[in-house]
Image: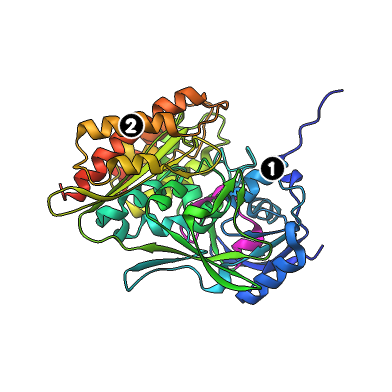
Amino acid sequence: MREIYRFPSVAFRPDEYLRAKTTDEVVAFLKKHGEEARIVGGGVTLHELGAMGLLSRVTKLVDIQQLGLDYVKVESGTIRIGASTPIRHIVDNDLFKREAGLRAIAEAADFVPIQVVNVATLAGALCTGLPILSLPPALLAADAKLKCLSSEGERILPLDDFYVDYFLTELKGDEFVTEVLIPRPGARVGSAFKYEKLLAVDYPIGSIAVRVSLDERGKCQECRVATGSLGRIPTRIKKVEEVLARTSVDEDTIEKASAILSKEIEAVSDLRASADYRRRLAGLLFKEAARMAVSRGKGE
Amino acid sequence: MTDVPISLRVNQSDQKVLVRPYETLRDVLRRLGFTGVKKGCDVGGCGACTVLLNGSPVYSCTVFAAWADGKEITTIEGVRSAEGLHPIQEAFAEKGAIQCGFCTPGFVICAKALLERNPKPTEDEVRREIAGNICRCTGYVKIVDAILSAAKATT
């Protein structure tokens, strides 16, 4: 039988749309509807997944734009980003471009198409649990935490412990993210984000974020390395971090760490790249990102 | 199913409309008669449905109409003035940056947003701005030419 083409927008038809006025309203809505409910940040990923038929159970939407969560604030050493802040406000905020320790976030946020950057939210990019987005590894390397609210109250969840599997995060039942918290890096902290993609507009086939904290003599005190688009979840690679810590991060150390990274990561094969290709690519991206993070940390 | 009442300001005129919870901004704009907002890929991949939302280009097919409540929208119908075509539209015609024309509204909208923010863009900046718009006829060279020449004409 001949298949009749159906426009993707026909596949996704939620029957309720709530514009919440308070966070309590959001929690009550999520509690009532459970798995049938989803938060609308900018709505981009919802449409994309819905069109693929992956959200057939989702029939209730709750919009969080009226909760006053569109802001980037710096308060006593912490950068607080509200859950409905579009990625555009990160790109346009000089703080992320100016401070070497935050540059990886600016680089991961400044992707194309601009049409997505203009509406999609940072919290949305973190909460969809899609391993191919660029912001999760950058925020992992920045040691970000999520402020979550549910009927049981508020809790702070480190992004380190957030990802479980494809599309699956630690968020429970009626819980949702209200704020993304990033510790503001001090002096001599450098970071960089590197990625590779196949087309001008496409998801990365591999991405890596590196953040190093150096002492006065340029020696690495602490290091965070996180990957995206390689395996089932955005992941920190602690074995590589250990190799770089307490060294001067010279070329030999970077080479050694790169080899360990290629071996250590969990890579998947898909239509964009094989697991083996991803492993080699990750090693190369790591070297570039590590060199750049160190040079930025030294203020070069 | 409960319809959602929303207000939009489209091309400087206020519109009050009832929308379905699943309806996209694109479908509602087309329903209101703004058929210059094209329905292409339907999943935020081709850029034919691009409109300005509070001055920034967005894919109107991945925005819920209810989400756009209270926002200001500019479609291709709102780009020309009473005096005639916008300089970007003139440049597209002049440079032959149009073949079938289906993608053109999206490109013009993106170009307008770019030139308002950055009146003298480089070729790279133009290409980055229109990266999310697909044209299957021209190969982009004439589109980029047209945007650069519109930038020259207006500064």
Which residue in the protein does label 2 denote? A258
Mark toward the viewer: 2 or 1: 2
Q: Quadrant of residue A60?
A: bottom right
The residue under the point 57% across, 67% down is A65
Please determine whether, in this image, residue A257 is positioned above or below residue A223: above
Q: Amino acid at mark 2?
A: Ser
Please determine whether, in this image, residue A279 is positioned above or below residue B12: above
Please determine whether, in this image, residue A102 is positioned above or below residue A17: above
The residue under the point 38% across, 50% down is A141
**Of the numbered discs in the image, which one, if any, rests on residue A51?**
1
Confirm whether residue A39 shows in the render.
Answer: yes
Which numbered disc flags the more N-terminal residue, 2 or 1? Answer: 1
Nearest the viewer among A150 and B108 is A150
* Residue A15 image position (x, y, % from top left): 78, 59
Confirm whether residue B62 shows in the render.
Answer: no
Location of the N terminus of chain A (image quadrant): top right
The residue under the point 67% across, 64% down is A62
**Dot 2: element:** helix
Nearest the viewer among A158 and B145 is A158
The chain holding disc 1 is A
